[in-house]
Structures are given as C-alpha cells and as structure tokens.
Image (cartoon, rainbow, N blue to C red):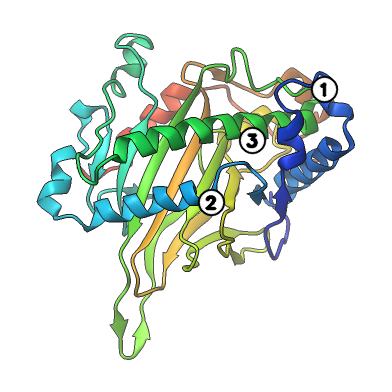
Amino acid sequence: MATDFKSLPVIDISPLLLKCDDDPNMSEDAGVIEVVRQLDRACRDAGFFYVIGHGISEDLINKVREITREFFKIPYEEKLKIKMTPSAGYRGYQRIGENVTKGKPDMHEAIDCYKEFKQGKYGDVGKAMEGPNQWPENPLEFKELMEEYIKLCTDLSRKILRGISLALCGSPYEFEGNMAGDAFWVMRLIGYPGVPFTNGQLENDIGCGAHTDYGLLTLVNQDDDKTALQVRNLGGEWISAIPIPGSFVCNIGDMLKILSNGVYESTLHRVINNSPQYRVCVAFFYETNFDAVVEPLDICKQKYPTGRGVSQVFKRAVYGEHLVSKVQTNFAM
C-alpha cells in the first residue's frame, strides 16, 4: 500500500540519463546512486512522482498537447473517420462516455494507439489487437509528430526503468530481454470537456474513474494550467498532481508491482474535471513484451520474501492476455 503522502516527489533524472547507455560502472556513480535512491523511495511510498531533467524538450511536449487539442476541435463527423472498432484492433477515436471504468462511463474522448506488430506474431491472443494505428489527416503532420514523441518516450521509459531496476535488483537490466526487451506500448490522447456552472458553482465530472495502470510505467503529459489528476494515499485522501510545466507525471503499473513482489505499489488514481476549460492529457504507457509471462522476479522473492511485510501471493500473468481482457471490457460499444 502507498503511504500517507501529501504531495508527489520531484526527481531530476538527468544524472541517470548521462550514464544510462554506455557506462558499465553507472551503478557506482554518485549522481546515479542519488537518483536511484529517490526512485526507490517514490515507488515504495507513492507509486507516483514527477520527472524533470528528462531530455525531451518542453517545446515538443507542448506541441503534442496542442496538436491533440486541435484534433478534438474538429467536427465530430471528421473524428469518426478514425473511429475505434474491434475490427480496427481497438485503435482510433472514441467518443465521450465510450470508455468505461468499473461500469461507469468516463467523461472524456480519446484516440488510442498501440505498438504495431505483424499479423499472427502473437497468435490468437494478439489477433484482437492487430492492425495499423489510425491517424487523422488533419491536423497536418499529426502522425509524424506523434511518432517522434513515441520514440522519445519509449527511450526515456527504458532508461527510467533501468534506474528502478538498479534500486530493486542491483542490476539495471532486469526489465529487458524476455521481460521487456521488445517492450509493448500504449498511448492515449485524451480530451476532457470543460464542466458547466450550476447555481453559480462549477460541477465536478469524473473524467476517468479510479483505477490502476496495468503495465510497467506511465508518462503523463498534462496541461500546465488545469489540475485534475488525483492520486489516493493510504489514508484514502485524494492528492492532486498539480502540473509542473515541462515535467512528466510518472507512475508504476500492475506488472511492475507483481515483478517487485509487492514492494512497489501501483496506486489508485482518477481524473476529476472541475474547470470550465477543455483539458488535454497525453498518457504514454510503457509495458512488458506483449507475450511476457509476469511473476515476481527471483531476486525480489529472495530479497523481499513478504513484499512490504505482508504475505502476498501473486498469480503469474501473461501481459498480452491481461491487456486484451481489459481492452475488450473497457468500452461501451
């Protein structure tokens, strides 16, 4: 469980990035050691943290949100040209209320994208997710900008996970190879309509109901001027993830919780709309390999036999099966 945190930690990961790719002695570097310590604390205490010093330009981060906002402004009939359907591999546009969390419609619209893969690569399990991503023709350069952003987020996520792996296992490479050497990814471009005034007060809409993410690591790129993302602490309080310009809000998912034998927490979070202005958020989810069998790592079972001090039994999960089951039940179609 998360602790009674009252705010989310801010971690400058630039010392980790400097050593991540080509330094075999990275684990001995004082700057890396400090970043790893902060990542470990954040993953244990909150499961959420801000990352700064990540190397992705603030200009690109803003452009990705703004071009997403431009798409959501176009007429509904135009958006439906890339409508998400089962036959399209659950890729594309979904209208407001189409995404469902715990049986209740979420007050947002979105474009869902997934890593593309060859037909038949993952057999019957992967069949439901096969197909190309559906990118809109307008705004112009939408696809090119998003593909550049995806590439950078993939690389950044891999490097953050090397730091988390050092903290958890003593080696930077536990989440590569058969586990995430061919990491799957998901990206959701999300628009939350502004809420109306009623009797002189703003209403609160549930933009996205309380949930945990089900992969390894999430990077959230949110509007700088609207606070809507909330994270639940151990005492049941909802703590706001107040935007920090140029940062990502980062959180860990269910697969990392399993791999860590419960030492790290995938924390409940939600989105509450309480602004009259339209809000945009771009969430990038870095996952295991699609066909990875996920269970507590041997080294985590040895170092943390009872996880966080409470006996827990984690069932093995095949990531792709888990993803497909979620996707097929997440939409009111």
Q: Is residue 323 left or right of residue 160?
A: left
Q: Earlier in the sequence, mark 2 or mark 3?
A: 2
Tell me where residue 279 appears, x and y as whole percent: 38, 62
Q: CA distance from mark 3 to mark 1?
A: 16 Å
Q: Give the residue number, with chain letter if any, for mark 3.
A: 257
- In this view, the residue in front, 100 or 162, is 162
Quadrant location of the C terminus in the rendered image: top left
Q: Is residue 104 visible?
A: no
User: Which amino acid type corresponds to the residue marked 1 in the rendered image?
Assistant: Gln
Q: Disc 1 on helix, strand or loop?
A: helix
Q: Amino acid at mark 2?
A: Glu
Secondary structure at badge 2 equals helix
Q: Amino acid at mark 3?
A: Lys
- Looking at marks 1 and 2 on the same chain, the residue that comes earlier in the sequence is marked by 2
Find residue 278 and report its image quarter: bottom left
- The residue that disc 2 covers is 58
